[in-house]
Amino acid sequence: MRVGILLLVAAALLLLWLVVGWRGGVDPRNYEAEYAVAAVYETATGRRVVEVARWVMGVGEENYTEFRRLTAMSEYTLYAATERGRVYTAMCVPDGGCGPSSGPSLPLDLKLSPFIKLPPGGTEAGPCEHLGWRGVVYRYKGVAVSLPHAASMSRDLDVCIWRGVVLWMRAQGPNDTLWINATYLRPYDKSRYWQILNIVKKYSR
């Protein structure tokens, strides 16, 4: 009888851990996220919001990125994937084909890595919730932020993080605010990884 009760308790704890820690089947060590990148400008005539890019990123044993710049006259897609410790990158433009990217500067990493690397020194600034996940906001003052379409700049940065996964980022500059919001979190997509790896290995130098 005691063994049966212990088994029921263990099963209940396992179920609770699965619901709380692995919501929706998302493993925070092995996942895919899509982010919407937008710039918000405050002007004398009001607020202007420009959708800059859509960014799909996979994190797992190997990582991958597909960063689609959306603004007119400057559309491109930057791909990146890792393989055995090496990062391959390539860039494609509409009706212009693909080729090697020339030192991509992707979000929030001045070392030219196509994956998020937050700067050190953030301080906790309270709770946050996004897409049903509850995380913690970390705040950074005057850190360098770089995107594929913009040079490095100093900004104040707020980041909502759930179990190491970035749910949203807000980078405040003197003239605009960059918002990078997750639109979904789901399990790591191995087929997408192989597709991107094939592209970048074909066109990388």
Image: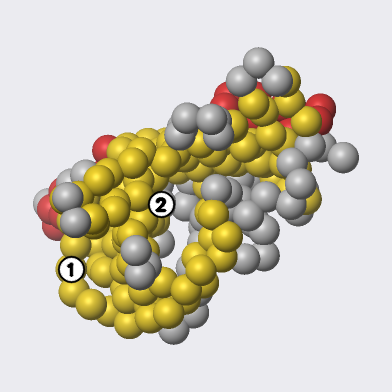
Q: Residue furthest top?
A: 95
Whether 66 is drawn above or below 149: the answer is above
2, 205: nearer the viewer: 205
43, 128: nearer the viewer: 43
> Alpha carbon of mark 1 to alpha carbon of mark 2: how far?
18 Å
Whether 35 is drawn above or below 43: the answer is above
Give the quarter of the figure containing the C terminus: top right
Whether 54 is drawn above or below 175: the answer is above
Kindly identify which numbered label has been placed on residue 28. Answer: 2
| Residue 115 in view in this figure | no
Question: Could you tell me which secondary element the residue under label 2 belongs to?
Answer: loop
* Disc 1 residue type (three-letter): Pro
Q: Which residue is mark 1?
A: 127
Q: Residue at x 35, y 50 (%)?
A: 39
Of the numbered discs 1 and 2, the one sitting upstream in the chain is 2
54 to the left or right of 200: left
| Image location (x, y in percent) of residue 42 | 24, 57
* Disc 2 residue type (three-letter): Pro
Q: How is the image coloured?
A: secondary structure
Whether 94 is drawn above or below 15: the answer is above
Q: Residue at x 34, y 63 (%)?
A: 175
* Location of residue 160 by image quarter: bottom left
Q: Residue at x 53, y 30 (%)?
A: 73
135 to the left or right of 164: left
Q: Residue furthest right?
A: 205
